[in-house]
Amino acid sequence: MIRALWLLVLISSAAFADTRNVLLVIADDQGLDLGVYGNSVLRTPNLDQLAARGTLFTEAFATVSSCSPSRSVIYTGLYSHSNGMYGLAHDVHNQHLLPSVRTLPQILQAAGYRTALVGKKHILPDDALPFDEELAPERPGIRDVAFMAGEARKFMAKSADRPFLLIVGFSDPHRAEQNFGNTRTWPGVTPATYDPAKVVVPAHLPDLPEVRRDLADYYESVSRLDSAVGMLLEALRETGHSSDTLVIYLSDNGRAFPGAKTTLYDEGIHLPLIVSSPTQGKRGVRNDAMVSWIDIVPTILDWTRVSRTQPLPGRSILPILEQSDPPGWDRVFASHNFHEIQQYYPMRALRTREYEYIVNLAAPLEFPIAGDIASSPTWRAIEARPAVGLGARTTQAFLHRPPEELYDLRKDPAEVHNLAADPAHRAVLERMRAELTKFRSDTKDPWLPGQSAVFGHRDNH
């Protein structure tokens, strides 16, 4: 009996000798706003340092700019129209993953991994994400990043015998009822305040005093998030896991301002992604590959050497971590259905390096404004000045959209001049229309007639 137990210990030790842990950090509503992405005002030294020791992806995209649907893609490797998380999970919105869908914690647990979630989950049903531990569980408006980092450190410290998957879901820089959670001093964080006169006003917003003040508050929340990332990286070092842990940092969707969050325009889905692997030979890489959150699960499975349990449309980005411009990474797809349950506005999109093509499947409807944006100082300022608009786009154009949109991103990076009806771009439109239709068929988009919602599913009625 003793000999058998000793052999079991030896086998287990050998299985995990080459430990490959995962730390996945998810920001909440952060746009492409970091010092390392070129914002000279916003101070994010810890994330800049993470990029210096890993790979910064300059062309990384969420597949949907809404919290629960985007997180469902990160957890499953399936588009939200395939996995069933069509909209928000919390409160009355009550969207759920389909029963047949397997999630990252389920897959890695079966392979012997210890799993934990610190902070925000925002996915249903609960039994689809059976983490071994849920630490600092999601609470409305949680901003105590030092507490969250401390809970993460405790988990890292006791994970010496088995590899781990640790997901940290921050609330920053999501809007709070007041000031993005900036109404108090949080433990362990020195507040970084910003002069509204110096913030960078993105092209999708009007340059108004209210907007600048709103952006300054958003910046402060981003800096608090950066402090939290520094705490997590220090926890990895203190627990001896810097040399065996793949670190992935990303945001679920664009900043919570009109023209960004819940849209499929670049400001909604073009987001930060930093990946740092302990096995990288080349560091400080700026990688221009067009990658997507659909690639996160395949990347983690590749790193952990765990097989896929179902067909996945994405691919691992580990083989291109040390490259600047790898071939064959030149398009991404996006898919939105709901945000809040009453905010139905299904869209599909194809984004290449030159063009973005968007199909608005319910174009007669007015585009809905998310609740946190509708109550924001920015939106109230825009509503009070109807002639101002959203940057170069009029408010009416933002709210009332045609069935198809096509933008030449080289000439029109703000995506204002719709070329879908332009005869000179008919060939481009038809080519992208055909490619998007094939994507919808391949992913069994239930909004495409004749399709099934998930792989292998059939209606039994």
Image (spheres, rainbow, N blue to C red):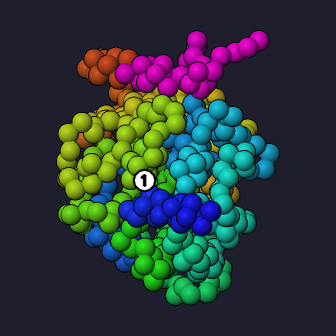
Evaluate whether residue 443 shows in this view: yes
Examine the image and state in which quarter residue 379 appears. bottom right
Residue 40 percent location from the top left of the image: 32, 72
Q: Is residue 326 left or right of residue 54?
A: left
Q: Which residue is mark 1?
A: 304
Q: Work out whether residue 205 or residue 237 is closer to the camera in this orientation and state it.
A: 237
Q: Is residue 32 visible?
A: no
Residue 295, by quadrant, is top left
Quarter that holds the C terminus: top right
As displayed, is residue 88 above or below residue 245? above
Q: Position of residue 217 (x, y in %)?
A: 54, 72
In the image as oriented, which residue stretches furthest toward the right? 92
Q: Which residues are magenta?
A: 435-461
- Please report the residue visible at 35 percent of the width from the left and 71 percent of the height from the top: 243
Residue 155 lies in the magenta stretch = no
SS for dot 1: helix
Is the magenta region chiefly helix, strand or loop?
Answer: loop
Which residue type carries mark 1? Answer: Thr
**Residue 341: x %, y % from top left:** 72, 39
